[in-house]
Image (cartoon, grey):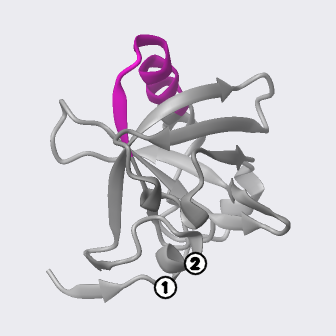
Amino acid sequence: MYLVVRASLALSGFVAQALFAGGTSVPVRVLEVNASSRERQTVRLAPAAADPSVFPGSCASVTLVVAYRRSHWWRATGTPSTPAQHAEALRVLSVAQQVGSAVQFGVMGQGLSATPGSPCQFSSHGLQVISENPSVPVVYSFFKWP
């Protein structure tokens, strides 16, 4: 495994640190999942622990605007998130919200994009559950794939 420094994490504020093999995650509480549209969902997350430094600007919560578009990924090799994987990630987040349990959330590649003028809002182009341990699902966000 090699050390990769992810500037995108520092930019998005999610755990600005050196990473191993491409991604990291933090425990979060899911406050809201609004999947009223197939093309656009909003997800509101808060730190699972009382640690406001998890999010940029010490935001008490962050809102993710997730707009999955198959056309966004059509040229990508090794597409990071298929429609089925994206739907599964939304299901995991919804279940975590319903039962009040924490879930691991992280970013891969340039996983999120900050929304200008809204320091606690970010955009994502796809979600996927990736987990080395089946009992601990980790939802990763993808915004731009290298």
x, y percent for residue 67? 75, 47
Q: Quadrant of the C terminus?
A: bottom right
x, y percent for residue 118? 80, 60
Please tell me which residue lies in front, 55 or 18: 55
Marks 2 and 1, how far apart at CA: 6 Å
Q: Secondary structure at mark 1?
A: helix
Determine if residue 74 is in view.
no
Q: Residue at left 23%, top 87%?
A: 3
Residue 95 drawn in magenta = yes
Task: From this view, report whether residue 132 is shown above or below residue 111.
Answer: above
Please tell me which residue lies in front, 98 or 144: 98
- Report which residue position mark 1 lands on: 7
Contact, mark 2 vs mark 1 (Cβ under 8 Å)? yes
Identify residue type, mark 2.
Leu
Most frequent secondary structure within the magenta stretch: helix
- Which span is picked out in magenta? 90-104
Tag of residue 11: 2
Identify residue type, mark 1.
Ala
In the image: residue 109, left or right of residue 43? left
In the image: residue 101, left or right of residue 47? left
Task: Please state the total of marks drawn on the protein image.
Answer: 2
Q: Residue at left 83%, top 69%?
A: 116
Q: Residue at left 49%, top 72%?
A: 109
